[in-house]
Image (spheres, rainbow, N blue to C red):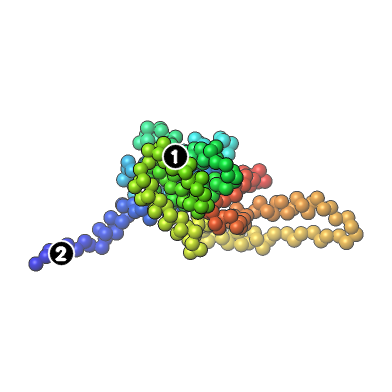
């Protein structure tokens, strides 16, 4: 008869602990999306962070418990390439906000490992590079209105694709062209489609490659458009605090002094009211939720305010 091999449960559990699955990688990328939104980083920072992460994961066998530290490191490395130095938060601040359960020295050690494995080559030609290039080419050659092809929408769709490991296997030029082609098909523009066909020919992208990846992109975008999907840019940042800290927070909430009574004699200073409203708006509630927007629901892209962590540090 056939031979059956039964793996003891403790061994199965250990195998899961030591093996990183695509779902865990995808969840980490969604976390990076939320963090880049929180810190007000550019789309380029997010896309490059994912690129660095995927390149490192392709080279190294990573344990799930280290993924959080690796993800934060990749975001920090990408931010140094893309962002102004004054806009990059400290390692301590990133650890505090991301709650990645590692120390500053852990982060430095991990950064050294990633840097050496990638030979300090952090810059990369990504799908975003091609998306901007192709978008510019189309706008230069079309007679249609320039605002027809919304670049913010296309960037947001690319970020949605970055949250799926499968797209790390696609050529950046092919992925960018897929996004543009799907958008142009939705617009039903013959002229724009002809321009993209010329771009495809010039880029030496085969019909079979384009068709294969376009189907996958189309399915991914349909999933992200569905109301059931929890989009990373709509997620609230959640802080996990100890019971004692929670108790202290609760006590301090109840000990807030009451606001002074507004006098009826007309001596009320309107400018003071505006200042107090501004202070309130930069509190923790505004940190944990993004303003609702009709565009966000459809295009999955976020508004880019000044990094709120800077505002907090100014007030403190």
Res 4 label: 2
Q: Residue at x 32, y 55 (%)?
A: 17
Distance from the alpha carbon under mark 1 to that under mark 2: 57 Å
* Observer able to see residue 77: yes
In terms of depth relative to the viewer, which is nearer, 236 or 234? 234
Q: Nearer the viewer, mark 1 or mark 2?
A: 1
Q: Residue at x 37, y 50 (%)?
A: 211
Circle 2 sits in a helix, a strand or a loop, which is it? loop
Q: Residue at x 48, y 64 (%)?
A: 228
The image position of residue 105, as x and y in percent, is 44, 40
* Observer able to see residue 54: no
Res 228 label: none
Quarter of image, res 175 = top left
Where 176 sits versus 19, above or below?
Answer: above
Q: Residues within 10 Å of mark 2 (few under 14, many from 20)?
A: few
The image position of residue 42, as x and y in percent, is 54, 42
Res 198 label: 1
Q: Earlier in the sequence, mark 1 or mark 2?
A: 2
In terms of depth relative to the viewer, which is nearer, 34 or 185? 185
The image position of residue 250, as x and y in percent, is 61, 62
Circle 1 sits in a helix, a strand or a loop, which is it? helix
Q: Residue at x 57, y 55 (%)?
A: 296
Quarter of image, res 109 = top left
In terms of depth relative to the viewer, which is nearer, 102 or 78? 78
In terms of depth relative to the viewer, which is nearer, 40 or 64? 40
Q: Are marks 1 and 2 in contact (CB under 8 Å)?
A: no
């Amino acid at each position: 008869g056939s031979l059956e091999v039964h793996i003891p449960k403790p061994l199965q559990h250990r195998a899961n602990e030591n093996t990183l699955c695509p779902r865990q990688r995808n969840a980490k990328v969604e976390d990076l999306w939320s963090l880049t939104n929180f810190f007000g980083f550019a789309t380029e920072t997010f896309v490059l962070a994912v690129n660095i992460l995927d390149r490192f994961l392709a080279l190294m066998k990573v344990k799930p418990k280290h993924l959080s530290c690796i993800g934060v490191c990749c975001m920090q490395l990408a931010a140094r390439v893309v962002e102004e130095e004054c806009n990059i938060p400290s390692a301590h601040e990133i650890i505090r906000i991301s709650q990645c359960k590692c120390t500053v020295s852990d982060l430095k050690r991990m950064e050294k490992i990633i840097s050496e494995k990638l030979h300090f080559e952090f810059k990369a030609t990504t799908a975003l590079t091609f998306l901007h290039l192709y978008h510019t080419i189309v706008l230069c050659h079309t007679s249609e209105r320039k605002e027809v092809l919304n670049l913010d929408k296309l960037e947001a769709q690319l970020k949605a694709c970055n949250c799926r490991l499968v797209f790390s296997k696609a050529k950046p030029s092919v992925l960018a062209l897929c996004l543009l082609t799907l958008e142009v098909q939705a617009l039903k523009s013959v002229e724009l489609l002809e321009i993209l066909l010329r771009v495809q020919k010039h880029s030496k992208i085969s019909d079979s490659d384009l068709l294969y990846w376009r189907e996958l992109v189309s399915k991914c975008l349909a999933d992200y458009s569905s109301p059931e999907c929890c989009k990373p840019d709509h997620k609230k940042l959640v802080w996990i605090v100890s019971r004692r800290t929670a108790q202290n927070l609760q006590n301090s909430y109840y000990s807030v002094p009451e606001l002074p009574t507004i006098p009826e004699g007309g001596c009320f200073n309107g400018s003071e009211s505006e200042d107090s409203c501004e202070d309130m708006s930069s509190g923790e509630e505004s940190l944990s939720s993004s303003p609702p927007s009709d565009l966000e629901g459809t295009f999955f892209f976020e508004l880019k305010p000044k990094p709120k962590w800077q505002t907090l540090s100014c007030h403190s």
